Image (cartoon, coloured by chain):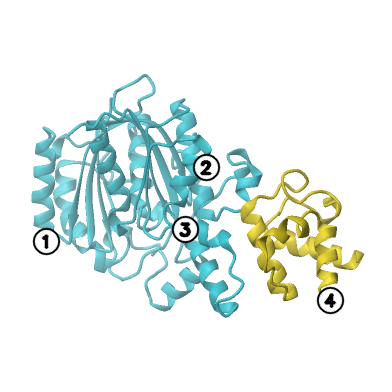
């Protein structure tokens, strides 16, 4: 399958990733058992008449998309593909609350229009005047991965430049309800995220966008060589076998991978297979993690991909991400092994170009 | 009438999320659409709901909207004429 070259990146997360100079030097801790994204001043990216109707997910997505497009130095794309687990949750909640509070009367159109999952992609398209392919994947923990798979297939069909992104937002009510269901826990200061023995994640939100190009250009930061999803693998051995086959497909073995970013979520119920996999990864590669920095959400793999690009660009693994003292001598290949709720697993291979 | 206009300013700012606009900046005689506040067709729907929710006024004929929503003053006059202020 065709590979994709990443020519621009934009990321809004609980960290200062909006700042292109930031590289895991200062870390914002979780707010107890959840993270909030650090949002920029949106006036720099979005016209005020559009801004007033947008919920947070839309604003985050449009701003991150804008940053990626600016970095790539382009004005047009051939396709816009977004992925989201929950979509524009704030507007969905607002519309549903209005139905309840007003006894199904006096319903206004704005929050309904803005609540649909494809609003982010469509708003970017309207702003860019892009009338081409526009698609939004709502595939739970595979939502972002699906955008990459689709982009790679579109390149085979002749598209040249594609904007892809993952978007997630949470609301105070969402945090309250999940907390009641005991889905969260505070990050344990004495137990690293890859050794968790207790259930609960740090719920989070954020967005990361990428301008992908079919061909390498002088703007290319890294390449996406391949992606594979695994639904409910039975054992960690199963994951390892699939991983070796995936790498073989790309002419690599595990020891060729300079850094492996692993999606430990701090919930022992979901991390067990990755915990079992870790010794094999550490034996042949350098293992690292990212969800203690970005938190857990359906499209956290988009943050992981942004991190992988930065690692390739900077050629160093920040201590805060490292699982052991082992440091990579170079960073040519980065592998992401993401998992969401122990159900959705994915491998994404990125390389220096 | 002035009190009703002031009340409407606050309600419109809230309903249309015009966070950047201060009530004193809204000229009651300026057009609401196109120029002036620069509202659009989605805002028109929001204003129809506003009249129904806050004043119990249901606009039966959509053609009337053009006259009613010409400016803040015409909106206030319409509310008065319906005896709902």
The reply to whether callout 1 and callout 4 are in contact (CB within 8 Å) is no
Of the chain colours in the picture, the one used for chain A is cyan
From the image, state whether disc 1 or disc 4 is nearer to you.
4
Judging by the rendered image, the residue that carries numbered circle 3 is A88
**Residue positioned 66% across, 61% down in the render:** B62
From the viewer's perspective, is B33 left or right of A131? right
Check if mark 2's residue and mark 1's residue have beta carbons within 8 Å. no
Sequence-wise, the earlier of marks 2 and 1 is 2
Disc 2 or 3, which lies upstream in sequence? 2
Q: Colour of chain B?
A: yellow
Q: CA distance from mark 3 to mark 1?
A: 34 Å
Image quarter where the C terminus of chain A lies is top left
Q: Please give left or right for residue A277 compared with residue A30 in the image.
A: left
Q: CA distance from mark 4 to mark 3?
A: 40 Å
Q: Quadrant of residue B69?
A: bottom right
Mark 2 residue element: helix
Give the structural element (helix, strand or loop) at label 4.
Answer: loop
Q: Can residue A3 be seen in this snapshot?
A: no
The residue tagged 2 is A63
Residue pointed to by mark 4: B83
Q: CA distance from mark 2 to mark 3?
A: 15 Å
Q: CA distance from mark 2 to mark 4?
A: 46 Å
Q: Please, which residue is most extreme toward the top here?
A: A218
Chain to which mark 2 belongs: A
Instruction: Choose mark 2 or mark 3, whichever is in front.
Output: 3
Which residue in the protein does label 1 denote? A235
* A32 lies above or below A244: below
Image point 39% across, 44% down: which residue? Answer: A165
What whole-number distance in Å separates the C-alpha atoms at marks 2 and 1?
40 Å
């Amino acid at each position: 399958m065709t590979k994709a070259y990443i020519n621009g990146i934009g990321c809004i997360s609980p960290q200062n990733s909006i700042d292109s100079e930031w590289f895991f030097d200062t870390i914002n801790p979780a707010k107890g058992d959840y993270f909030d994204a650090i949002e920029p001043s949106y006036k720099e990216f979005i016209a005020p008449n559009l801004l007033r109707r947008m919920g947070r997910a839309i604003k985050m997505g449009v701003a991150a998309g804008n940053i990626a497009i600016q970095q790539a130095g382009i004005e047009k794309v051939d396709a816009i593909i977004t992925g989201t687990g929950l979509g524009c949750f704030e507007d969905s909640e607002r519309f549903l609350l209005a139905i309840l509070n007003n006894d199904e009367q006096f319903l206004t159109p704005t929050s309904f229009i803005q609540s649909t999952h494809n609003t982010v992609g469509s708003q970017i398209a309207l702003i860019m005047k892009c009338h081409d392919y526009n698609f939004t994947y709502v595939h739970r923990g595979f939502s972002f991965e699906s955008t990459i798979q689709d982009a790679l297939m579109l390149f085979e069909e002749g598209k040249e430049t594609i904007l892809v992104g993952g978007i997630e937002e949470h609301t105070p009510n969402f945090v309250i309800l999940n907390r009641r269901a005991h889905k969260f826990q505070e990050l344990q200061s004495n137990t690293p995220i890859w050794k968790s023995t207790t259930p609960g994640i740090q719920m989070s939100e954020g967005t990361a966008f990428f301008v992908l190009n079919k061909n390498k250009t002088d703007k290319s930061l890294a390449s996406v060589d391949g992606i594979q999803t695994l639904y409910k693998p039975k054992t960690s051995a199963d994951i390892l076998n699939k991983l070796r086959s995936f790498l073989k497909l790309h002419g690599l073995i595990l020891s060729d991978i300079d850094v492996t970013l692993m999606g430990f979520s701090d919930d022992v119920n979901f991390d067990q297979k990755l915990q079992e996999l870790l010794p094999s990864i550490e034996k042949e590669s350098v293992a690292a993690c990212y969800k203690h920095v970005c938190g857990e959400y359906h499209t956290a793999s988009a943050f992981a991909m942004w991190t992988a690009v930065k690692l390739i660009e900077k050629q160093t693994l920040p201590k805060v991400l490292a699982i052991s003292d082992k440091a990579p001598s170079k960073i040519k290949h980065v592998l992401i092994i993401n998992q969401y709720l122990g159900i959705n697993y994915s491998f994404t291979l990125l390389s220096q170009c | 009438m002035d009190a009703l206009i002031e009340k409407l300013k606050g309600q419109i700012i809230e309903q249309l999320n015009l966070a950047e606009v201060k009530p004193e900046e809204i000229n009651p005689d300026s057009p609401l659409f196109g120029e002036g506040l620069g509202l659009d067709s989605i805002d028109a729907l929001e204003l129809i709901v506003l009249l129904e929710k806050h004043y119990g006024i249901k606009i039966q004929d959509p053609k009337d909207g053009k006259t009613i929503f010409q400016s803040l003053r015409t909106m206030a006059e319409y509310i008065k004429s319906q005896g709902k202020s």
